[in-house]
Image (cartoon, helix red, strand yellow):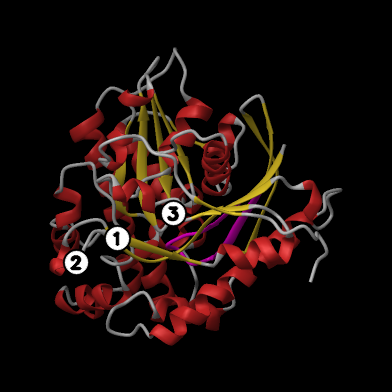
């Protein structure tokens, strides 16, 4: 069985696409690509992630525009391979989160919205498409996130090591797999900002989309006054299960933070160092408070390429911190592969949520299935 996983995350870098072979519930990555978003398109998405600037007409259009972007990512992924649309058994698409409200904030019903309509994918490619993975978990009292832990349990749990898997995308999240654990013993939750703040202020001060290799952070110093204030983040202090996103770490909120903490009074390099140190703190704080007994830390996501983050995690935790490549997996492909796993479980009629991670009252089958069309002709 061949499947494609699609992921557009909080970093808004573009569409991550993984081509995966599935045999006897073993998932093997064949190819991974990222289709970058053009800057104007990225700004259009960003514009619609805030109540103050979002427009219903643009969100409606983006729902279809993202669908076409996902099809383009599939085409890029299959390019140069022996596979055509008709060779792919299913596509599993996370979509792009526009709003995620797992609590009764402002009297609103707990809800979530991912766009990038599956009908566009299914009808343009002729491939059965699974989407809307978060909603079923929320209906049974969960936060709809994190969803990656089920795939991590299936791919990595073992009887010999207590494993800590740390993903650092726009938001950072951890999964703890005690050796010999059952699915009910998995611990997983969002830790706080991963790259979202680093990328925003790197773009603002250095006109670069991200801090390549952590070079900027490595060349500066931590501003204690700002760091001490950042540590007061109420999400960091909240007990798990918990999840977050750009609703909290929006451009508006980051600009407000910069103004309140007088970022402009300091060297921009030191600002990036301080914010990156805050990302490290938000990760290690949760290890020390909730995990403690672990043999191995394995980092994935865009943050795994930031050498400042890896260096500081090693120093604080006083242990070896590995990247997923060190154990034969792709750091960048992790989430796209995870949705292949979840899509597979959906088609098998098996639950895909980890209740201990999301807070759901019971395991449920995740996702909505959009059937393929009979014709497999591109167009």
Q: Which mark is residue 169?
A: 3
Residue 328 locus on image (x, y percent): 62, 32
Q: Along the polypeptide, which appears first: circle 3 or circle 1?
A: 1
The earlier-in-sequence mark between 3 and 2 is 2
First to last magenta residue range: 5-19
Q: Is residue 142 magenta?
A: no
- Residue 322 at x, y percent in the picture: 48, 34
| Residue 6 lies in quadrant | bottom right
State if disc 2 and disc 3 touch (CB < 8 Å).
no
Tell me the CA gap for discs 3 and 1: 22 Å
Element at badge 3? loop
Quadrant for residue 48, please give it.
bottom left
Q: Residue at x 37, y 48 (%)?
A: 136
Residue depicted at 34% across the width and 57% down the height: 276
The residue at which mark 1 appears reads as 111
Residue under label 2, please give it. 108
Residue 56 location (% of width, % of height): 39, 84
Q: Nearer the viewer, residue 267 or 44?
A: 44
Within 10 Å of the Cα at label 2, are there few (<14), some (14-19), or many (20+) other Cα atoms? few
């Amino acid at each position: 069985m061949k499947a494609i996983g699609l992921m557009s995350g909080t970093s808004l870098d573009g569409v991550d696409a993984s081509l995966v072979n599935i045999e006897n519930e073993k998932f093997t990555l064949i190819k991974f690509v990222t289709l970058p978003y053009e800057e104007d398109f990225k700004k259009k998405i960003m514009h619609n992630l805030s109540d103050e600037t979002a427009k219903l007409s643009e969100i409606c259009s983006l729902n279809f525009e993202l669908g076409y972007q996902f099809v383009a990512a599939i085409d890029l992924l299959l390019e140069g391979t022996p596979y055509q649309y008709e060779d792919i058994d299913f596509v599993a698409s996370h979509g792009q989160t526009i709003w995620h409200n797992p609590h009764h904030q402002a009297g609103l019903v707990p809800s979530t919205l991912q766009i990038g309509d599956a009908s566009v994918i299914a009808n343009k490619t002729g491939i059965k498409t699974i989407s809307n993975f978060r909603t079923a978990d929320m209906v049974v009292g969960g936060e709809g996130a994190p969803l990656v832990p089920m795939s991590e349990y299936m791919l990595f749990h073992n009887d010999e090591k207590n494993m800590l898997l740390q993903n650092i995308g726009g938001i950072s999240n951890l999964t703890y797999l005690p050796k010999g654990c059952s699915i009910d013993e998995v611990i997983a939750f969002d830790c706080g900002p991963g790259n979202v703040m680093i990328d925003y202020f790197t773009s603002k001060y250095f006109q670069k989309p991200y801090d390549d290799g952590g070079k900027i952070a490595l060349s500066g110093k931590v501003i204690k006054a700002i760091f001490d204030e950042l540590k007061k983040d109420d999400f960091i202090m909240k007990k798990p299960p918990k999840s977050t996103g750009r609703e909290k770490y929006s451009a508006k909120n980051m600009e407000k933070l910069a103004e309140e903490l007088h970022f402009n009074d300091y060297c921009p390099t030191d600002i990036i160092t301080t914010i990156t140190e805050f990302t490290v703190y938000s990760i290690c704080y949760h290890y020390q408070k909730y995990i403690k007994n672990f043999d191995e830390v394995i980092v994935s996501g865009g943050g795994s390429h930031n050498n400042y983050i890896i260096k500081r995690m090693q120093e604080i935790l006083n242990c070896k911190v590995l990247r997923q490549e060190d154990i034969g997996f792709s750091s960048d492909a992790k989430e796209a592969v995870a949705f292949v796993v979840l899509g597979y479980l959906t088609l098998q009629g098996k639950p895909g949520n980890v209740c201990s991670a999301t807070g759901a009252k019971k395991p449920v089958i995740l996702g909505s299935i959009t059937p393929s069309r009979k014709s497999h002709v591109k167009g």
